[in-house]
Image: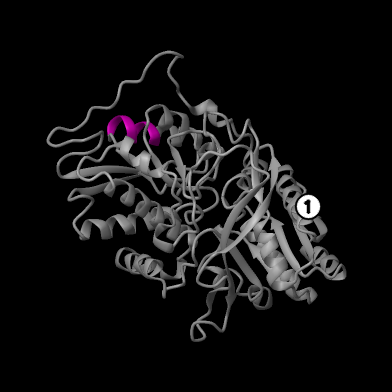
Amino acid sequence: MIAGRVPGSPRLVAAACTVVVGLLAASCGTRLAPSAFTTLPPVGVSIPPAPTSAGGASDVGITATSITLGLIVSKTSPLGQDTFSGPMYGAQAYVNALNAAGGLAGRHVDLDVCDDGATGAGNTKCVQQLIDTDHVFAFVGNSIFNYAGAAYVDQHGVPDVGGEPITNAYDQYSHLWSIYGTQSPRDGVVGWDGMLSGGTEIYHYFASTLGARTAGVVAYNQADSQRFADLTARALQREGYTVVREQLDFAVPSWDSAAIDLEAHHVDILFDALDAAGNVSLCRAMDTAGLHVKAKVVTVQSWTETVRSDYRDAATCRNSLYAAGTTRNYMDTDDATVKRFRDDMTASFPDREAKLSMWELEGWASAQWLDDAAQSCGQSITRTCVEAYLARPTEYDGHGVLAPRDFIVTPKPTTRRACIFAARWEDDAYGGDGGWVTTTGKDPYCYDAPQIWYSP
């Protein structure tokens, strides 16, 4: 699965997901724009707040004994039930553990989950039900394929904390707080006057640590795939790489030909703008062609336990897989916060051990972020107080599980200090069981990264 801005961006899950959108559009027909599904009030008409509960309520969704949160997930999806559901499991695990420990400020946390079916209409329905009927205090752990209801969430002033920025909504609306943070104004316009950027930190990391200099970029002959490949190539060139482009026919891709050509050009690191199945097929072809690279880099959404089974027929390539992002490796159980995550997941979802992923850890971290924000309010938990915590001029690191991030608005930057974690899959690691081995050490790798600008 492709997910992410320019892969070096600290927000690795947004604009390049248009690759997936485009692939679905190519195979499933025309998709309406998200605005077609969003019902907004006339200009100048105010929206009355939902009624608060009696008995010690401090804001919508809060009583003296409970707090109601919402979570929207695109679980039922043409891409499969596990594609977008990871953050949901992580958030649920955190909330379950929180309730077992006495709740949030002594209040039991009720987490209402709505599956929007990965459609704009379904998303709008979930948003309206959770806001207008369930009267949720905030959203947490959202992973939404088509966030058609984002404007409705924003106009009702409902904090959306720690969502995966699969669409550009988290760079547009002030009450949406991405798990990756952002410095864009979020004033109703995407990014900085309609422009977004991604850094080159990941490319710099691999050049400086592995000595990689010739990069392959593989994409389909499909508009969104090509757009992301173009961004990737620009970022690589900015860091001094020689770039070799490969374009594959989306309907009948010739994986073997691409691998042979990459090997002939002596490519030593590989990036792509492909879907999950395409990545596996490319790896098989690489092994067949004898193409051995220093790193085949995948994005955060592919940083999962399922690598061992997904790439079972491409062992050599599998052991060259690297992943990089702004969240600590979910296998680093020597870190106390990661261990808490693993313990919470085992307690709530013991059957998901073989499907653990970075997205589950990020969903868990989103609930932790909301918990920290709410705890800062004392007994009088309010949306205003929670958002003041999120917007504070202090970077947040999720108790060490996240590279530092914030929502401090800045002018359009030319460079940005960016920090990442990286890991490599090794079959021989963890006593021969295999797994992701952190390569950036205990602390994240930081770099003043040039910004690559693009229109979303």
For residue 195, which quarter of the picture?
top right
184 relative to 124 in the view: left or right: right
Q: Give 263 or 6, whichever is nearer the viewer.
A: 6
Q: Give 147 or 325, whichever is nearer the viewer.
A: 325
Task: Check disc 1 and report the residue beneath it.
Answer: 249
Residue situated furthest right in the rendering: 264
In the picture, the quarter occupied by the C terminus is top right
- Give the magenta-colored segment's residue range: 126-133
Residue 250 visible? The answer is no
Q: Give 94 or 399, whichever is nearer the viewer.
A: 399
Which residue lies at the image location 57% right of the left edge and 29% below the top edge?
Answer: 189
Residue 183 image position (x, y, % from top left)? 54, 42
Residue 64 visible? The answer is yes
Residue 195 is inside the magenta segment: no
125 relative to 13 in the view: left or right: left
For residue 101, which quarter of the picture?
bottom left
Residue 409 image position (x, y, % from top left)? 53, 38
Residue 127 is inside the magenta segment: yes
Residue 154 image position (x, y, % from top left)? 43, 31
Which residue lies at the image location 23% right of the left edge and 27% below the top edge?
Answer: 51
Is the residue marked by circle 1 packed among few (<14), some (14-19), or many (20+) residues within 10 Å? Answer: few
Residue situated furthest front in the rendering: 393
Q: Amino acid at mark 1?
A: Asp
State whether the magenta stretch is mostly helix, strand or loop. helix
